[in-house]
Amino acid sequence: MALRSPSTLINSEFNQFLFAPIGEEGNGMMLSVVSALARLEIDPWEEAARLAGLPNEIAAAALGQLIDRLPRGLWVRSDTPEIATRLIALLPQRTRTVGSDQPRDTKRAKMRLSVIEGLLILALTASLLFTTIGHRGSGLNRATDGSASAITSPAAER
């Protein structure tokens, strides 16, 4: 679990969710989400961010599974879906619908396409550069050969 700076803890967009009570424990103390996740050795802020990015139904089901892993408090197992749904509603409002992954996937696809286009342009440029250098190089060799014969030709005539 990563340590958080004090300012991150105070100003976290997930505080309303993390410090909300799950329910009362057997000893009479209220169990918060942050405490429950820490007991499960899950980074509370990372889990909150992960859940916030999921559609509400999936996030509630995932949180419900985590709550079910906890030692029983004064709540009953049949209350878990309702508790999880109540807590997920406290996460920051983001587009958490089933179709919300589409824009992110589209951005990734566009980025991949841009990278591929860039690599193709780089490959074509390199190919043209090597072709141009190859032609110039062979032309210089011919000119050198011709110049050498022109220089030696007058001397040979004498």
Image (cartoon, rainbow, N blue to C red):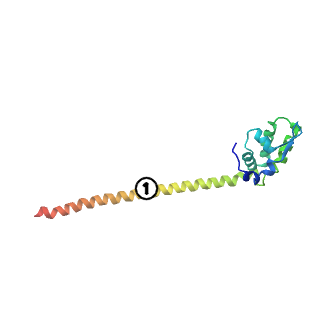
Residue at 44 percent across and 56 percent down: it is 126
Residue situated in front as seen by the camera: 34 or 76:
34
Residue situated in front as seen by the camera: 51 or 2:
2
Residue 74 is left or right of residue 117, and the answer is right
Q: In the rendered view, tell whether residue 46 sits above or below residue 153.
A: above
The residue under label 1 is: 127
- Dot 1, crowdedness within 10 Å: few (<14), some or many (≥20)? few
Question: x, y (%) of residue 156?
Answer: 13, 61
Q: Quadrant of the N terminus?
A: top right
Residue at 20 percent across and 60 percent down: it is 149
Amino acid type indicated by mark 1 = Ser
Quadrant hosting residue 58:
top right
Q: In the rendered view, tell whether residue 8 sits above or below residue 156.
A: above
What is the number of callouts on the image?
1
Residue at 81 percent across and 37 percent down: it is 68
Question: x, y (%) of residue 123?
Answer: 47, 55
Quadrant hosting residue 131:
bottom left
Residue 141 is left or right of residue 42, and the answer is left
Question: x, y (%) of residue 102?
Answer: 69, 53
Q: Quadrant of the C terminus?
A: bottom left
Residue situated in front as seen by the camera: 45 or 120:
45
Looking at the rendered structure, the secondary structure element under dot 1 is helix
Residue at 17 percent across and 61 percent down: it is 152
Residue 2 is left or right of residue 127, and the answer is right
Question: x, y (%) of residue 153?
Answer: 16, 62
Q: Residue furthest front?
A: 6
